[in-house]
Image: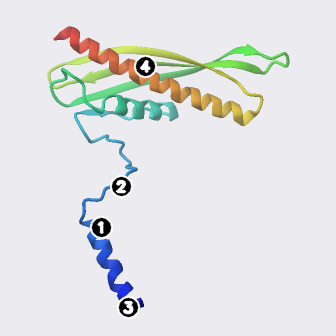
C-alpha cells in the first residue's frame, strides 16, 4: 500500500502540472495582461488605486490604438470635520487628488481627478484606523472609475 502511494503521488503531481493549472490568486493582478499597464503608485492607498485601475481597465481602453501606460501621482489628505465635547474627532473625510498621464502609441492624454469619502470615527482607537483604511479604499475605487471615465472621454473627443 505504501509502495503504491510512493509512485502514485509523483505521477499525480506530474499530471497536475501538465494540465494547464494556474493559481487563482496571482501576484501581478493582471499587470502584464491586456494592453493597459499601470505604473506603481506609492503608499497603501496608491496600491488600492492601482488595483482598482487594473480592474477598471481590464477590458482595455476603446480608441487607445495599442498598448497603454498610465502613470498616476496621488495626493491623500484626511480632514477632521466633526468633534465630540471631549475634543476627539467624530466625523472625517479622505480626500484623494490624482494627476495622471495615459500614454498611447501615437499620443498621450493627461488630466486630474478628485474624490472625497466621508466616514464616522468610532471611539475605539483601532476602530478609527479601520474606518480610515476602509474610506481610503472606497475613495480609491471611486477615483479609479473617475480616471478611467476621464481617459475614455478625452479619447472620444479626439476621435
In three-dimensional space, the C-alpha distance between marks 3 and 2, rounded to whole angstroms, equals: 30 Å
Residue 55 occupies which quadrant of the picture?
A: top left
Give the residue at x 38% y 48%. Answer: 27
Instruction: Give the mark nearest the N terminus, 4 or 3.
Output: 3
The reply to whether the C-beta atoms of the residues labelled 4 and 3 are less than 8 Å apart is no
The circle drawn on residue 93 is none
Q: Is residue 128 above or below residue 95?
A: below
**Element assignment for label 1:** helix
Image quadrant containing the N terminus: bottom left
- The residue where tag 2 is placed is 23
| Mark 1 or mark 4, whichever is nearer to me | 1
In three-dimensional space, the C-alpha distance between marks 1 and 2, rounded to whole angstroms, equals: 12 Å
Q: Position of residue 129 (x, y in %)?
A: 66, 33
Few, some or many C-alpha atoms within 10 Å of disc 1 (few <14, some 14-19, many ≥20)? Answer: few
Q: Is residue 76 above or below residue 130?
A: above
Image quadrant containing the C terminus: top left
Instruction: Give the mark nearest the N terminus, 1 or 4.
Output: 1
In three-dimensional space, the C-alpha distance between marks 3 and 1, rounded to whole angstroms, equals: 21 Å
The reply to whether the C-beta atoms of the residues labelled 1 and 4 are less than 8 Å apart is no
- Tell which of 6 and 84 is nearer to you: 6
Q: Position of residue 146 (x, y in %)?
A: 39, 18
Give the residue at x 19% y 31%. Answer: 67
**Element assignment for label 3:** helix
- The residue where tag 1 is placed is 16
- The residue where tag 3 is placed is 3
In three-dimensional space, the C-alpha distance between marks 4 and 3, rounded to whole angstroms, equals: 62 Å
Amino acid at each position: 500500500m505504501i509502495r503504491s502511494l510512493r509512485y502514485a503521488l509523483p505521477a499525480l503531481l506530474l499530471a497536475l502540472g501538465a494540465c494547464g493549472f494556474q493559481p487563482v490568486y496571482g501576484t501581478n493582478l493582471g499587470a502584464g495582461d491586456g494592453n493597459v499597464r499601470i505604473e506603481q503608485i506609492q503608499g497603501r492607498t496608491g496600491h488600492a488605486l492601482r488595483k482598482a485601475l487594473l480592474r477598471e481597465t481590464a477590458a482595455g481602453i476603446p480608441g487607445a490604438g495599442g498598448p497603454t501606460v498610465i502613470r498616476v501621482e496621488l495626493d491623500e489628505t484626511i480632514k477632521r470635520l466633526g468633534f465630540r465635547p471631549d475634543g476627539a474627532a467624530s466625523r472625517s473625510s479622505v480626500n484623494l487628488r490624482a494627476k495622471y498621464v495615459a500614454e498611447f502609441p501615437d499620443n498621450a492624454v493627461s488630466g486630474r481627478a478628485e474624490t472625497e469619502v466621508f466616514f464616522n470615527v468610532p471611539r475605539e482607537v483601532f476602530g478609527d484606523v479601520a474606518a480610515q483604511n476602509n474610506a481610503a479604499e472606497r475613495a480609491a475605487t471611486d477615483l479609479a472609475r473617475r480616471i478611467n471615465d476621464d481617459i475614455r472621454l478625452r479619447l472620444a473627443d479626439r476621435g
